[in-house]
Image (cartoon, rainbow, N blue to C red):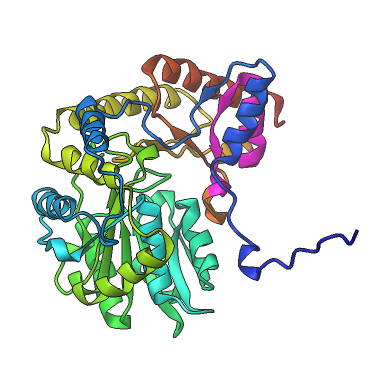
Amino acid sequence: MREVTYRLSQRLSGLSKSSFDMLVKAKRLEDEGRRIIHFDVGEPDFDTPKNIKEAAKRALDANFTHYLPPQGLKELREAIAEDEKKTKGLAVSPDEVIVTPGAKPMIFYAILAFVDPDDEVIYPDPGYTSYRSMIRLAGGRPVPIELREDEDFALDIRRLERLISAKTKAIIINTPHNPTGSILTIKDLEGLAAIADKYDLMVISDEVYSKLIYEGEHVSIATLPKMRERTIVVDGFSKTYAMTGWRLGYGIVPQQLVPKIVKIVTETVSCATAFVQKAGVEALKSAQNDAENMRKRFKNRRDLAISILSESKYIKVKKPKGAFYIFPNIKALKVSSYEFTDYLLENFGVSVVPGPAFGIYGEGYFRISYATSEDLIEEGVRKIVQAAEEIASKGGI
């Protein structure tokens, strides 16, 4: 029998490593009976609030289980528009909202809408691993802009402008930022807005952590003059309401682009799940006590982890202002990020994500997700400090 040769598409080559790779390694050790402390997965450890789950149950009991319009349930789009105005000062019509099964598809749809083969998209590095992969899958060329620790992991406008070419179509930003927890200031955004206007570029603004802020404030670039027309805002329910597995996100899209992107939704996923959209209405329109309590707990966890990391002579750490990640600097240890994270996992049973999983400029760093209990943070972060001391005392691994 002839062996099948799979003639795979070129778009599958060169996709980014995933932050889930460390989780796979950690799970393998757990299957062998090892106890592992997980700082790897980027999702809240809290349960979805009870009232949101009850709303989904009611929708199921009412047989709300059929197709909805691809753009999304009108009631949910109205609730999203109201929330965007209240929390971001962004005046939005429900007709400018597109509901998707998670925020990630909305980012991909925005890229697909603008990127032809060999077009360029600038994205943050270190940054969310899927940006680069999505650009490649769309046939585009990913162009990383380095985010530097000594610049608070912000966008340097002069460095950004040097990366722009005749093929540049769009810029992706993420604030609050994964993996560093940094926030773009109004000054940062004004500089970016001037660049976008000067070179006629679209901005895809990933704001999925917009309600997880501990210092400062979230500003959406879409609220700046002339930016509403050239910005696609992406947000969702996963992080704020501990709804990662529900898969519910949305985009705020300039009106004339809505039919184009809705067409992509129609031809790919048809619509977001009906009863999940009903749960989304409940999440936005009900009291926000659970979401606020989660935010406060995350802040306390951040402060605990930072206080322990700061005890180390070999780990440099910048306090994040949002999201639920810390991105420590281990360059003083003279080992690679992968060497450090593998050593930490194998010898101390702590799973973190190596910095290069978030891009080439992530070398010398690793990411801690502090979306876990205070007890595990206390134990696990002390083990990280201990691992650094041990490596330093031996002069390497």
Point out the image quarter for the N terminus. Answer: bottom right
Q: Residue at x 32, y 47 (%)?
A: 248
Please say if 94 is above or below 282: below
> Image height check: is 183 above or below 301?
below
Q: x%, y% of residue 311?
A: 44, 22
Tell me if 126 is positioned left or right of 275 in this view. Answer: right
Residue nearer the viewer, 274 or 324: 274
Query: Measured from the top left, where is residue 345 in percent x and y?
Result: 62, 26
- State whether residue 106 is above or below residue 392: below
Q: Residue furthest right?
A: 1
What residue sits 66% from the left and 24% below the top?
Answer: 29
Q: Is residue 106 left or right of residue 334?
A: left
Secondary structure mostly taken by the magenta-highlighted segment of the chain: helix
Residue 391 visible within the image: no
Q: Nearer the viewer, residue 259 or 37?
A: 259
Q: Which residues are magenta?
A: 334-357
Whether residue 337 is in magenta: the answer is yes
Tell me which residue sits at (65%, 69%) in the image: 10
Left or right? Give the position of 6 relative to 146.
Answer: right
Task: Tell me where residue 318 sits by quadrant.
Answer: top left
Question: Residue 280: x, y in percent?
Answer: 22, 43
Observer-nearest residue: 99 or 366?
99
Residue 372 pos. (x, y %): 40, 24
Q: List the single residue furthest toward the bottom.
A: 166
Q: Residue at x 17, y 43 (%)?
A: 281
